[in-house]
């Protein structure tokens, strides 16, 4: 008998995604997996129980899914394990920000994999769920900004004369930032992009945006292709130069995040207040504290006639396509550990498996999580 894979209905507030869609069911069944789906797990994403059943899934209760599954695939890992020892749970669990979740799963004897920790390598590209979800967030951020801005994005020639295009600045040229640049350009705005990593200048310009050149004295490149944390002097210099750029913008979209840390403040309240009345800031780092000093996660505020929007979990606002992308990522990730015989092989010599493994056999296996807990490898 092959592996038993379960999918639960997500319980996190506002979460409308589902871990797998009927489209990726074939990938699991071809690997010999039996799939158990909680009833209505995909309903909020537009996927019916009948769609899953037609692909061979067994529809049942949450209790049944937990009891019968060797492996649980989730979008957001439940805060507490289901109680079944030796189960494997895969999903977003943010162990670098919330290491306590790792302690609970280790104590329960559950093997936990974090989709946030998928390495950014060529081989792991098809499993990189953070990048997939960042694409959705970057796209949606521009639509939110366009809806909130009391001006039009494109240049328009009308009977009343020509309306100039909106000016949009995107801070941070990772996946979300580049998607935001591309989307704002498609809507007709004049777009500028900035990142502390000078290496992304070509990527910004290839999308038709202007690269904002701010000199901080050294490269901002960190490990794994992410931006590194800047020194106090670098931050001061960056803010002074950025303030002059922001004064000319109608929209600013911030996307900068450092894994496992509070988001860096890139836009102080003084910088936000130099923008003209009616301008909009959309802060994609709101969930990690925000890149803008005025941001409140999950809220829209107006400060001196500038609107600051702090959206949370934007991928869940486009649940159908987000679930399709995520489902492909997580199933590809799981298939990397399934042998030709249909057994699960957790091989720590494989860099993808090793880097994403958080707990196993009652131990916390990830060194960074161990450090954060400060209690060694034993939970």
Image (cartoon, rainbow, N blue to C red):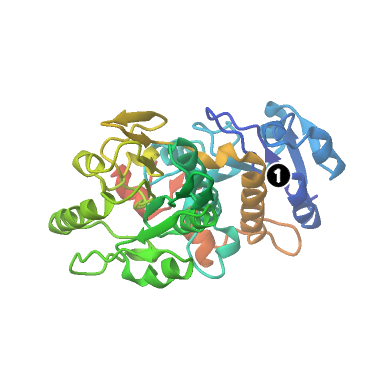
Q: Residue at x 46, y 66 (%)?
A: 208
Q: Is residue 305 visible?
A: yes
Q: Is residue 348 visible?
A: no
Give the SS element for disc 1.
strand
Residue 266, image x and y in percent? 26, 49
Specify the quadrant of the image occupied by residue 8: top right
Which residue position is annotated with label 1? 5
Nearer-the-camera pick, 121 or 340? 121
Residue 313, image x and y in percent? 49, 38
Q: Which residue lies furthest to the right in this view?
A: 54
**Vertical order, 146 against 329 (above or below):** above
Horizontal side, residue 361 vs residue 280: left or right = right
Nearer-the-camera pick, 310 or 143? 143
Horizontal side, residue 17 vs residue 290: left or right = right
Horizontal side, residue 196 vs residue 157: left or right = left
Residue 227, image x and y in percent? 33, 60
Specify the quadrant of the image occupied by residue 211: bottom left
Where the C terminus falls, by quadrant? top left
**Vertical order, 23 against 52 (above or below):** below
Q: Residue at x 17, y 57 (%)?
A: 231
Q: Residue at x 25, y 31 (%)?
A: 304
Please count the marks in the image. Answer: 1
Residue 273, image x and y in percent? 23, 39
- Label 1, residues with CA under 10 Å away: few <14, some 14-19, many ≥20: many
Nearer-the-camera pick, 251 or 332? 251
Q: Residue at x 27, y 64 (%)?
A: 220
């Amino acid at each position: 008998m092959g592996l038993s894979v379960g999918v639960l209905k997500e319980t996190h507030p506002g979460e409308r995604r589902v871990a797998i869609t009927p489209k990726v069911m074939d990938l699991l069944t071809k690997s010999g997996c039996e799939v158990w789906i909680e009833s209505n797990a995909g309903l909020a994403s537009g996927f019916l129980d009948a769609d899953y059943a037609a692909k061979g899934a067994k529809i049942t209760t949450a209790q049944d899914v937990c009891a019968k599954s060797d492996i649980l695939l989730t979008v957001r890992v439940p805060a507490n394990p289901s109680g079944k020892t030796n189960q494997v749970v895969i999903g977003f669990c943010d162990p670098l920000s919330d290491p306590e979740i790792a302690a609970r799963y280790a104590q329960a004897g559950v093997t936990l994999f974090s989709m946030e920790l998928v390495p950014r390598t060529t081989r792991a590209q098809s499993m990189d769920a953070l990048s997939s979800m960042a694409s959705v967030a970057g796209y949606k951020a521009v639509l939110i900004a366009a809806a909130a801005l009391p001006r039009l994005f494109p240049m328009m020639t009308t009977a009343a004369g020509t309306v100039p295009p909106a000016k949009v600045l995107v801070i941070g040229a990772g996946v979300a930032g580049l998607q935001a640049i591309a989307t704002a350009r498609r809507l007709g705005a004049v777009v500028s992009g900035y990142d502390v990593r000078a290496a992304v200048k070509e990527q910004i310009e290839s999308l038709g945006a202007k690269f904002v050149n701010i000199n901080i004295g050294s490269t901002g490149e960190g490990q794994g292709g992410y931006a590194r944390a800047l020194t106090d002097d670098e931050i001061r210099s960056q803010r002074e130069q950025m303030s002059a750029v922001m004064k000319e913008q109608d929209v600013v979209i911030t996307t900068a995040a450092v894994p496992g840390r509070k988001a860096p403040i890139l836009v102080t309240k003084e910088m936000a207040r130099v923008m003209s009345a009616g301008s909009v800031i959309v802060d994609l780092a709101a969930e990690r504290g925000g890149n803008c000093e005025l941001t409140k996660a999950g809220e829209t505020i107006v400060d001196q006639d500038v609107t600051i929007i702090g959206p949370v979990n934007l991928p869940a606002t486009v649940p159908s396509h987000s679930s399709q992308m995520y489902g492909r990522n997580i199933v590809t990730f799981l298939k990397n550990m399934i042998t030709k015989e249909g057994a699960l092989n957790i091989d720590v010599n494989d860099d993808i498996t090793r880097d994403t493994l958080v707990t196993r056999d009652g131990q916390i296996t990830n060194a960074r999580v161990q450090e954060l807990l400060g209690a060694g490898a034993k939970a």
